[in-house]
Image (tube, helix red, strand yellow):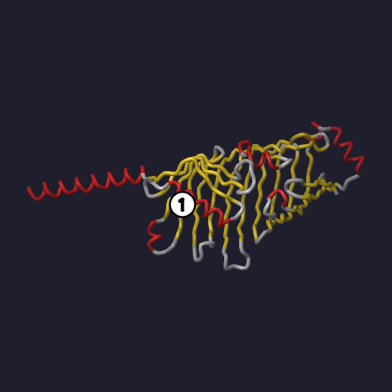
Amino acid sequence: MASEAKNKKWLGYTLYVVLVAVILFYFLFPAQAVEEFLDNSVSRINPEFGFKAEKIRPWIPAGLRITSGEIYLSNKPGPAVFKTDSFFIGPHILKYIKGEYSVDLAGKAYRGDIKGTLHFTGADKDITGEITFRDFVLADYNFLNEKFKTGVIGNLSGEIVYNNESANAAGRSGRFDLRLSDGELLFQPPVFNITSLDLQSIKLEAKLRRREITIIKAELEGPEVNGSMTGSIQLQNDIRLSQLNLRGTLEPLAEFYKNYPEVRELLKAMKKRVKRGQYFFTLTGTIGDPKFKLL
């Protein structure tokens, strides 16, 4: 009995010491050093980007909880490129023991949810990752709204797979699968006196190789217009200067002609090519200043 009581006593002391250690670690946590580490990690992916957060704290089980984290353009003032309300980073402890580096991600951003995994292999610049997100409210995405003339609002969901291998000649590569629902396309300035179009859904499949995004498939469905598009985007360090080389079709529906009867007469007068009710177009220029042309 005495031995059992002694064991319980030492167990109590051990739990007490562990509890005190956890409390001290929480309050003495080196948040600034961790923020600098995350900032350097973001810069390794793209030197144009930086990272900052309102608060960084340890979280149980092993991990970090970030409050109001931002990825921003280092040398240019303006809204954050990406902002999250709260974010959890959880390392895979067993993989760390084996010398592998992998973390789970989970959080909330733009009133939606985001989850994913990042893997760090080989040199510190070799990064692969998979991110899924659901119901991002684009109206809250200030970077998109303030940088581009033509805007899109709605709820965005999708999946992004990214690979940045320093030893690979292809360099950065990846694929995108995006879906927009309950959307609206805003024209600034208006096109043919049209200020906006209702979009029932947009589905986009694309791949990244080096500095080029290839649009595999883009489909638009709405009560007024259907459409499709393919082509490529040549990326630049300043995303607004990225070059567009896109082609597609637009199919105005009965509701569109009902809402904009003057456009039907204008299209007839312009004698643009039409096949099965579809018009052909090109989209060139840059992301920040696109040039739309009917063929």
Say which residue appears at 92% left-offset and 40% top-offset.
269
Q: Is residue 80 left or right of residue 26?
A: right
**As drawn, 94 above or below 294:** below
Could you say whether the residue bearing mark 1 is in a helix, strand or loop?
A: strand
Q: Residue furthest left?
A: 1
Q: Residues within 10 Å of mark 1 (few under 14, many from 20)?
A: some
Say which residue appears at 71% left-offset and 56% top-offset.
234
Q: Which residue is mark 1?
A: 104
> Could you tell me residue 241's position as x and y percent?
73, 51
Q: Of residues 227 and 114, which is closer to you in this image?
A: 114
Q: Is residue 105 left or right of residue 216?
A: left
Say which residue appears at 14% left-offset and 50% top-offset.
7
Q: Of residues 53 and 148, which is closer to you in this image?
A: 53
> Could you tell me residue 17's position as x and y percent?
24, 47
**As drawn, 277 above or below 102:** above
Q: Is residue 102 left or right of residue 145?
A: left
